[in-house]
Amino acid sequence: MRPVLVYTLVLLLSACSGPLNDPYPAGEQGREILYAAFGERPKHLDPARSYSSNEVAFTGQIYEPPLQYHYLKRPYELIPLTALEVPQPRYLDAAGRPLPDAAPVARIAESVYEIRLRPGILYQPHAAFDGKRELTAEDYVYQIKRLAHPALHSPIYGLMTGYIVGLADLGNALTEAAKRQEGWLDLRRFPLRGAEVVDRYTYRIHIQGKYPQFVYWLAMPFFAPIPWEVDRHYSQPGMAEDNQSLDVWPVGTGPFMMTVHEPKRQIRLVRNPNFRGEPYPAEGEPGDREAGLLADAGRAMPFIDEAVYSQESETIPYWNKFLQGWYDASGISSDSFDQAVRIGAGGEAELTEEMRAKGIALKTSVSASSFYTGFNMLDPVVGGLGERQRKLRQALAIAMDMEEYIAIFANGRGIAAQGPLPPGLFGYREGEAGVNPLVYDWIDGRPRRKPIEEARRLLAEAGWPGGRDAVSGRPLVLNFDTAARGPDDKARLDWLRKQFRKLDIELVIRGTDYNRFQDKMRQGTAQIFEWGWNADYPDPENFLFLLYGPNRKVGSGGENAANYQNPEFDRLFVEMKDMANGPARQAVIDRMVAILRDDSPWLFGFHPKGYTLHHAWLYNVKPNLMANNELKYRRVDPAARAAARAQWNRPGWAGPVLALLVLVLALLPAWRAWRRNQEATAA
């Protein structure tokens, strides 16, 4: 019995060296590691395929397109990343002759962007390379060609065929080549006039006509480099079966590289040993210096050695671990809002006393985002542009009380959307001019949702009086596809059913994981769905293209998830996208928004207000709605974090001591019996 007691005592005492509930290895204490979490595993980390916010959290730290956004300046400003400067387009006419910058759009046949790269940039170590591998212009051209690869189904391929010269022809050629050849297609053998290598560090992109927004795409992972060696490496036989691909193991020149990818447990990014270093910005906007955001000006980034992302499928465990100091930053779920934030008399958000006592800081921002409920316009019941289907959608738009939703599930952190454009983007209208007249009345200086009787009238005119078919009498049953399926989502989905029941419509919830949900959207098998969009770049075209017909998801693989197609809207989109901001462009946008309100391919949801918390030991935190490579700017103070964790996770010794005493008392009779037996044997 003595060894048992001694071993138990040693276990209890050894726990004194750190918090008993520390979820991380002891060897990580004191290291400059950032701790975060992820919910749904990233499905695509290949830059030709990835287009979701949960994926760009990783791809943005690993891949480097030629441009990036200034981390601190507002309005958002494009600056070089691997390029020497932000390229300015040269315009050519149909005969290839140069045109002045002020040339009419109708005369511009091509816009040519020439990108010059910084020499000496190296990729992370990887098995595909024989030694160190330098970044070259050919790598960027190779990736542009990958957008047309038939096996990749790039979500921007359909859109980019309308811009990059020859991309559609390349897609056709690759499709035919894939039929004749198994295995790796060496894209170097396939020319693309729209992307040409000039020299080792220079390449050109040819754009059809004038597309001023294209320069924003050069700050996105779609236009990051992929070396041909990496493409060949992952195309070897057996690689896919062994889960070896760019979708799982990205390869880039960025400040971090992925070393652990266990989707149901943990993802780790570590400092790229070949990264060249990059200076922290030396200027920002007014107030940044006072906020400490320029304290690291000029220092080489990245500041942290590693970022550890743990899988958290539910918000409450994530929140509790943040309060214990195991995560460095956190959003605020509806369940935790009152614990973290209180709304002052003037409507401003303030931290609660509990949060301030922990030194937690709050950052807020109006997101350039839009969450919406969409209709599959290919569906025979809710889709199409006929009067019956349009009035059904309009009725549902009135019934869906987004003000109530924001109050209940977002704690007031958002504004009801009147159209697809969020605040802060050109084309968004404030006040009465911006209200959707099909859903709201303007009363006493504010919008007021139309009464439910108006929705019932529209439903009857659509041929569904009382929620039943006017001819057959059958009830109207609609299906709602969502990636939400956990216990945190039950109340919200019950609320959604309630909105449809206002019109005596039964709503069937079809929940699945996000990856399966994406598959259903791509195949067009959903009927009604919910989704959202975060701005890729600060231009209205980036939201209006979500409803542009040629960009539909089914058939084109684009981001028009509703598969909406209205010829007049599409015509206006083509006219609007090349215009400079001004009254003429605003007038075109107003007409486009009016068409969308009437057709109602979306139930316009809300534009969220972002609330982010972070601990005092995490520095250089400033919301940037455009940049996706923010990890390199972050800095942590490991000593301050360790001290706070020790204070917040002090073990309660009363329980263990009591357990030890109970164990001793329980074992004492056995020990006495053993002693008597030993003494009797000796006698």
Image (tube, rainbow, N blue to C red):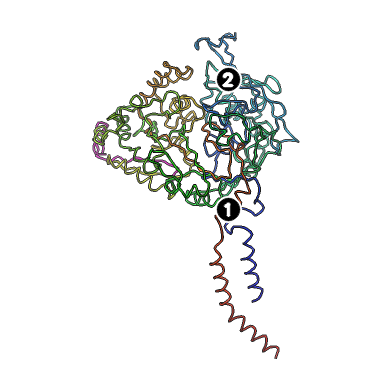
Q: Is residue 241 visible?
A: no
Sort mark 2 into few (<14), some (14-19) or many (20+) by Cα contacts within 10 Å. some
Report which quarter residue 154 is drawn in. Answer: top right
Q: Is residue 637 magenta?
A: no
373, above or below 617, in the image: above
Q: In the rendered picture of this protein, how many numbered marks are placed on residues? A: 2
For the N terminus, which image quadrant?
Answer: bottom right
Query: Which mark sits nearer the N-terminus, 1 or 2?
Result: 2
Sort mark 1 into few (<14), some (14-19) or many (20+) by Cα contacts within 10 Å. some
Report which quarter residue 56 is drawn in. Answer: top right
Q: Is residue 495 visible?
A: yes
498, above or below 668, in the image: above
Secondary structure found at label 1:
helix
Q: Is residue 534 left or right of residue 257?
A: left
Label 2 is placed on what type of residue? Answer: Gly
Q: Position of residue 318 (x, y in %)?
A: 51, 49
For the C terminus, which image quadrant?
Answer: bottom right
Range of residues picked out in magenta: 460-484
- Per the image, the residue denoted by label 1 is 645
Q: Is residue 20 left or right of residue 565?
A: right
Q: Nearer the viewer, residue 18 or 414?
A: 18
Secondary structure found at label 2:
loop
